[in-house]
Image: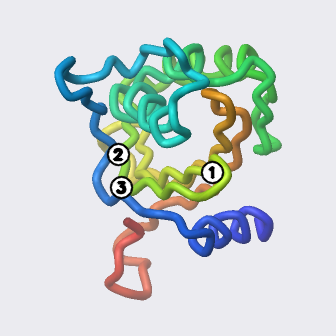
Amino acid sequence: MKAVVVAVSALALAGCSAQNEPPAAETQADAGPVDPMDTTNRAELSDREVSDRFIEVFYNQNRLTDGFRAWVHPEYIQHDPNSPTGRDATIAVLAAHMEANPEMTHDVKRVIYGDDGMVAVHYHFKRDPADRGMAVVDIYHVKDGYLVEHWDVLQPVPDPAEVLNENTMF
């Protein structure tokens, strides 16, 4: 976990910019909103454009497997020891997760864009509306139009009666 905290800290120190609103679909001057599933000329997209399109599909639209198929490299490297590595293996796990949790939500609180294709997504994950959920930070490495690597940090949202301060996790 120390390495992940260091990675998040490195993002903060590497001249990153934070966005406190969930990413909006990009727009082209005359063409209107960009389809977040459009992978045309992916290598020409900026790391931020790739990230924003993935975030829109995966987190905001809750289309986990679609987001992975479109934006994650087949040789995706997963650093969570409880998850498989590789895009297709992860898609199988995500499909089962979606089926078991049809009411899950990913409420994106902020996105931090760092140098060298690093992006961190801080969000409130809930399996269902009654769940207090978890505060999650997903860290991705983007390269050549694909998400190629992933780390995560998860923290359960405690019972309000048990918190030691009035600050929120989000």
Tell which of 2 and 12 is nearer to you: 12
Quarter of the view holding residue 106: top left
Question: Looking at the image, is mark 3 or mark 1 nearer the viewer?
Answer: 1
Residue 59 drawn above or below residue 70: below
Could you tell me which secondary element the residue under label 1 belongs to? Answer: strand
Element type at mark 3:
strand
Q: Are marks 3 and 2 in contact (CB under 8 Å)?
A: yes
Q: CA distance from mark 3 to mark 1?
A: 17 Å
Q: Is residue 111 left or right of residue 141?
A: left
What is the CA distance from the residue labelled 3 to the residue labelled 2?
6 Å
Q: Earlier in the sequence, mark 1 or mark 2?
A: 2
Q: Residue at x 34, y 26 (%)?
A: 61
What is the quadrant of the N terminus in the image?
bottom right
Kindly state the secondary structure of the residue where label 2 is placed. strand
Label 1 neighbourhood size at 10 Å, few (<14), some (14-19), many (20+)? many
In the image, residue 50 lies at what x, y percent? 51, 32
In this rendered view, identify the residue nearer to me: 3 or 93: 3
Q: Which residue is mark 2?
A: 107
In the rendered view of the protein, which quadrant contains the C terminus? bottom left
Task: Identify the mark nearer the N-term, 3 or 1.
Answer: 3
Could you tell me the amino acid type at mark 1?
Answer: Met
> What residue lies at 42% left-to-right and 16% top-to-bottom?
37
Mark 2 crowdedness (10 Å alpha carbons): few <14, some 14-19, many ≥20: some
Q: Which mark is residue 118?
A: 1
Q: Position of residue 164 (x, y in %)?
A: 43, 87
Q: Quadrant of residue 79?
A: top right
Kind of residue indicated by mark 3: Lys
Q: Amino acid at mark 2?
A: Asp
List the residue tagged with mark 3.
109
Place residue 166 in its image quadrant. Answer: bottom left
Residue 88 percent across, percent down from the top left: 72, 14
